[in-house]
Structures are given as structure tokens and as C-alpha cells.
């Protein structure tokens, strides 16, 4: 009989690999995810995908997060700057991308070619039902031009386990109203990425990601890749810079800011499985690793080829 209970365990697992799994929502077109469900029927005959005139190449995401119960923060929120390197395929004078629940503070277009005519942002509009914003340029941008779209924004961590959401360790907290230590974790599948950074939130629009997170010093930050370096910009804060990812979709991007420790798990068929556990499971870690390794190997066909979170108590 196992000497530990799942209700005392906080597990966070990153998976990356390949499998024969199918989309659990494959009865619904991919581009319908994220749409307000009460209006789905109205859109069934429409193609709601973003334009194919422009696609992302790389995202540079710079986040500064506050976590409730840490460093005096009364709630969990974040400020971010998303710099998106674009591939312009057809002439465009506007760029539509996904954003949901974010306050867009400003947006700009930066030309990578010094001799090119500058382009500016004339206005920003939003579409609540499509969960998008549209950046309107002051001139037409041609396919041969190299541009970056830079968006500065603010967001609040959610409580519904979608996007970048807030959770807590039950060892210290009996409810969400208690005072920490809280953690942040992301759940981007199927359409949660747009809740914490503006993006082209469609599986086919893959790109590389470079993420750096400014967070409370007593917490750790975890993402898809290993940490490249850490810095201490001010007292009480740490800047964690992650290595650049391989090509991936937005729903594959993962982030967690927490007080937990990380352990790597060898699982056949996956490049890396990172298990993050709470202190009260430390003595049972060998058994936990063995159980989850066997479980993942046995049920690999049900896992998707991306980084996946398991949060269980």
C-alpha cells in the first residue's frame, strides 16, 4: 500500500515528444476554440481563422509578475512586452491577432531594415467575440519588408485554470482567500495563451519563443526550456531568462512561478519530463517518479506532443 495520498501532492509535469494522439475537440474546427460558445452556431459557416497574409516567426516575451502573498503583493498580476517578429506574405495595412482580457497599453511597428520607410500604428481596435485586437498601420507594408510588432500590456492572473492562472498549496491554504504562498501556472490548451500574451493563437502558426520573467526572489520560474541565466535587477526580484524554444504552437508554451523544486523524469517517447513537487512529498519522490513514469509510458497514446501541465492535490 502506498504511504502517500494524492491530495497532498502538487505535481507539475512538462512533456515534449511525439504521439499518435488526436485532438479531444476534433469534432470542432480548431479555429472555433476561444470563441464565445453561445455564438458558435452563428459562425459555423464562416472561416474564423486569422489572415494568412502575415505570420509570426519568433516571440520575445518579457514578463514581470506579481504573485499574491509574496513580496507584499495583494493580488497576482503581470506586465508584459511581446515583440513578435513577422513574416509578411502579402501586402497588409492591418494585423489581427488574439488577445483576451489583456489591457493593451501601446503598440508599435519596428522595421528591421534601416533604409526602409518607417511604419507607425494609427489605431488599435478590438473584437470581443473573435477575442482579437487589430493593429492598424499608417501605410501598407510589403512582403519584402522585415517588421517586428511590439505590444505592451497588463493582465491579471485568472482563477479558472485557464491562461496564466493562480493556484495555491493546500498545505498552507484552505481556500483562495488565505494569504499564500500562491503560485502561478499556465494552461494554454486549447486557447489559453491569448489570456497572458497577445499572439497568433492558432496551432498552424508556429514560431520560436524567447521568454524572460521578472518574479519575486523567493520563487522559482519554470518554462519549456532550461534557464539560460538569472539576474537580480533590484532587491527582492529575480530575472529568469530561458533558452530559445524550438518551433511550437502557442498552446505549447508553458510557464509556472512557484516555490517548488524540479526533478527530471526519463520517459520513453518524450524528450523531457519535468516533475515539480512540494516539500511534503519529498520522502515519497522515488515512488512518485516510478508511478508517473509507468503511467505516462502506459498511456502515451493519450498525451499530446507538447508541454503539458498536471496539477493535482
Image (cartoon, rainbow, N blue to C red):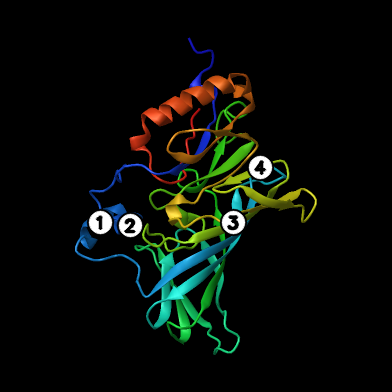
Disc 1 designates what residue? 40
Is 41 above or below relative to 300?
Answer: below
Label located before the other in sequence (3 or 4): 3
Q: Which numbered mark, 3 or 2, is in the foreground of this view?
A: 3
Label 3 to label 4, Cα distance in Å? 14 Å
Along the line of sight, the residue nearer the viewer: 225 or 27: 225
Disc nearest the viewer among 4 and 2:
4
Check disc 2 and report the residue beneath it.
35
> Is residue 239 among what the camera can see?
no
Q: Is label 1 in a helix, a strand or a loop?
A: helix
On the image, the x and y values in percent for residue 111 come to 56, 81
The answer to whether mark 3 and mark 4 are in CB contact below 8 A is: no
Local SS, label 2: loop
CA–CA distance in space, label 3 to label 1: 33 Å
User: Of the residues under marks 4 and 2, which one precedes in the sequence?
Assistant: 2
| Crowd band around label 1 with a 10 angstrom C-alpha radius: few (<14), some (14–19), many (20+) | some
User: Is residue 95 toward the left or the right of residue 285 in the image?
Assistant: left
Q: In what element is the residue under mark 4?
A: strand
Disc 3 and disc 2: Cα gap in Å? Answer: 27 Å
Say above or below: 282 vs 202. above
Mark 2 surroundings: few (<14), some (14-19) or many (≥20) residues within 10 A: some
For disc 4, the marked residue is 220
Q: Which residue, given by chain and number where applicable, does mark 3 sit on?
A: 211
Which circle, 3 or 1, is nearer the viewer?
3
Q: Secondary structure at mark 3?
A: strand
Amino acid at each position: 500500500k502506498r504511504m502517500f495520498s494524492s491530495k497532498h501532492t502538487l505535481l507539475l509535469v512538462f512533456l515534449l515528444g511525439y504521439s499518435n494522439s488526436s485532438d479531444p475537440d476534433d469534432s470542432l474546427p480548431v479555429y472555433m476554440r476561444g470563441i464565445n460558445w453561445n455564438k458558435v452556431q452563428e459562425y459555423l459557416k464562416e472561416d474564423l481563422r486569422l489572415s494568412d497574409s502575415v505570420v509570426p516567426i519568433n516571440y520575445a516575451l518579457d514578463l514581470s509578475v506579481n504573485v499574491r502573498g509574496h513580496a507584499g503583493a495583494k493580488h497576482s498580476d503581470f506586465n508584459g512586452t511581446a515583440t513578435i517578429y513577422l513574416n509578411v506574405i502579402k501586402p497588409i495595412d492591418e494585423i489581427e491577432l488574439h488577445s483576451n482580457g489583456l489591457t493593451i497599453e501601446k503598440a508599435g511597428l519596428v522595421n528591421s531594415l534601416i533604409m526602409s520607410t518607417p511604419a507607425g500604428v494609427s489605431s488599435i481596435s478590438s473584437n470581443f467575440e473573435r477575442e482579437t485586437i487589430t493593429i492598424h498601420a499608417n501605410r501598407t507594408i510589403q512582403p519584402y519588408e522585415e517588421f517586428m510588432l511590439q505590444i505592451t500590456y497588463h493582465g491579471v492572473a485568472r482563477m479558472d485554470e485557464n491562461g496564466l492562472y493562480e493556484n495555491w498549496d493546500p498545505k498552507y491554504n484552505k481556500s483562495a482567500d488565505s494569504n499564500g504562498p500562491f503560485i502561478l501556472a499556465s494552461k494554454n490548451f486549447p486557447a489559453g495563451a491569448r489570456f497572458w500574451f497577445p499572439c497568433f493563437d492558432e496551432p498552424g502558426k508556429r514560431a520560436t519563443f524567447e521568454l524572460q520573467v521578472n518574479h519575486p526572489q523567493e520563487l522559482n520560474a519554470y518554462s519549456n526550456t532550461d534557464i539560460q541565466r538569472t539576474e537580480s535587477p533590484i532587491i527582492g526580484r529575480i530575472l529568469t531568462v530561458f533558452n530559445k524554444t524550438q518551433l511550437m504552437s502557442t498552446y505549447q508554451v508553458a510557464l509556472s512561478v512557484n516555490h517548488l523544486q524540479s526533478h527530471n523524469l526519463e520517459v520513453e517517447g518524450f524528450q523531457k519530463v519535468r516533475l515539480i513537487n512540494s516539500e511534503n512529498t519529498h520522502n515519497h519522490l522515488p515512488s512518485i517518479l516510478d508511478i508517473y513514469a509507468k503511467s505516462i509510458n502506459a498511456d502515451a497514446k493519450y498525451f499530446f506532443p507538447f508541454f503539458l501541465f498536471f496539477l493535482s492535490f
